[in-house]
């Protein structure tokens, strides 16, 4: 209630929540995404060795996962840059 009444406190609370969300992505979600990428890499590699016709499908999925991961990482860095000044005060 007091936070909602004070604009400065509200902004500080929002920055704290954003910092927590960014931290969670870097420490938990990023590792989960990397694990999924590694699983797909293994699946593609095994399909390639076995000359499985699905290897192209797996390769395309792997490329898409790489692209999505890079975009998410860029997003998180941008979000961090937006709140960076609030982290030091």
Image: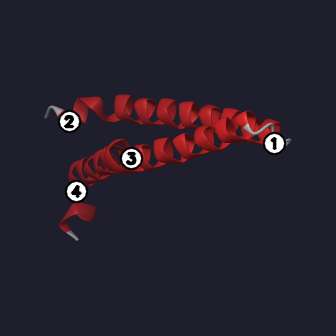
- SS at badge 1: loop
Which is in the foreground here, disc 2 or disc 3? 3
Q: Mark 4 points at which residue?
A: 6
The residue most toward the right is: 53
Which is in the foreground here, disc 2 or disc 1? 1
Residue 8 x %, y %: 23, 48
The residue most toward the front is: 50
Q: In this view, does 10 lie to the left or right of 65?
A: left
Sequence-wise, which precedes: disc 2 or disc 4? Answer: 4
Is 81 in front, or is 61? 61
Sequence-wise, which precedes: disc 2 or disc 3? Answer: 3
Q: Mark 3 points at which residue?
A: 25
Sequence-wise, which precedes: disc 3 or disc 1? Answer: 3
Image position of 47 with respect to 2: above or below: above
The residue most toward the left is: 89
Please tell me the numbered disc located at residue 52. Answer: 1
């Amino acid at each position: 209630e007091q936070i909602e009444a004070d604009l400065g406190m509200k902004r500080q609370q929002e920055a704290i929540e954003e910092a927590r969300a960014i931290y969670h992505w870097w420490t938990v979600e990023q590792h989960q995404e990397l694990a999924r990428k590694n699983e797909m890499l293994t699946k593609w590699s095994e399909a390639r060795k076995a000359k499985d016709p699905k290897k192209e499908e797996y390769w395309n999925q792997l490329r898409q996962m790489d692209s999505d991961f890079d975009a998410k990482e860029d997003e998180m860095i941008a979000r961090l840059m937006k709140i960076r000044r609030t982290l030091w005060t």
